[in-house]
Amino acid sequence: MNHFCIIIDSQRGHSRLDRCLEAVTHAINTINSPVDIIVLVDKIRTRCTVLAERHNAQLLERCGGTRGQRYNVCANRTQANTLIFIDPLVELPAGWLAWAERAMFERSWDAVALTMIGTMKLSWLSRFLSAGSDTLALSVKRQWFERVGGFDVEREQGIESDFLLRLVACHARVLNQTPEVSRTTSRELHR
């Protein structure tokens, strides 16, 4: 059985964490596989504890300096065979997780990235996303995560883009989609 672990680094979207966890909880209800949620926080506070309990998430105080280091530490703490890294700044389309699961396990993709195309970027969001960091969610099979050595521990920005380039260089099958395409595809899943 497929086992997913969703990892959310709240540093970039602390104020939007509740909305992000709501979307994740809804997405989890669209699949039958077990899903763990890990939320990286600066410091475990009452608000975060309440959110974690409400959404059945595990809180983990940040360890490591860069985003690449933090994500790698989280990935190494779970035994899930599929790792999903989500940017909390944006709400994912409701059917994205079911779509990613189907793409990876029925159609044999090794990684699935949900990216924002330039015309879809909101101006306020562009301030937070640097060039090359338009990945809203990244789902990857653990074996491929380990094969390429995880995220670059020296990087804070653009870690998903760098990771995807290394996957492609190692001949992984990477599917890159936009939110609009995954919304359309998720409607097709429910037919």
Image (cartoon, rainbow, N blue to C red):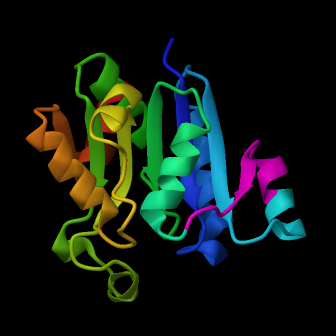
Location of residue 39 by image quarter? bottom right
Residue span colored magenta: 51-64
| 66 horizontally vs 144: left or right | right
Q: Residue furthest top?
A: 1
- Front residue of 122/188: it is 122
Location of residue 169 by image quarter? top left
Look at 18% across and 75% down and name the residue there.
Answer: 119
Give the image location of residue 128, x and y in percent. 40, 82
Give the image location of residue 83, x and y in percent. 46, 37
Give the image location of residue 173, x and y in percent. 16, 31
Residue 59 on the magenta span: yes
Q: Is residue 27 visible?
A: no
Q: Is residue 187 above or below residue 189?
A: below
| 40 horizontally vs 129: left or right | right
Give the image location of residue 175, x and y in percent. 19, 39
Give the position of the C terminus as an image quadrant: top left
Q: Is residue 13 visible?
A: yes
| 35 horizontally vs 104: left or right | right
- Front residue of 92/72: it is 72
- Front residue of 33/11: it is 11
Look at 28% across and 67% down and name the residue there.
Answer: 134
Look at 30% across and 26% down and name the residue there.
Answer: 104
Look at 65% across and 64% down and name the residue there.
Answer: 62
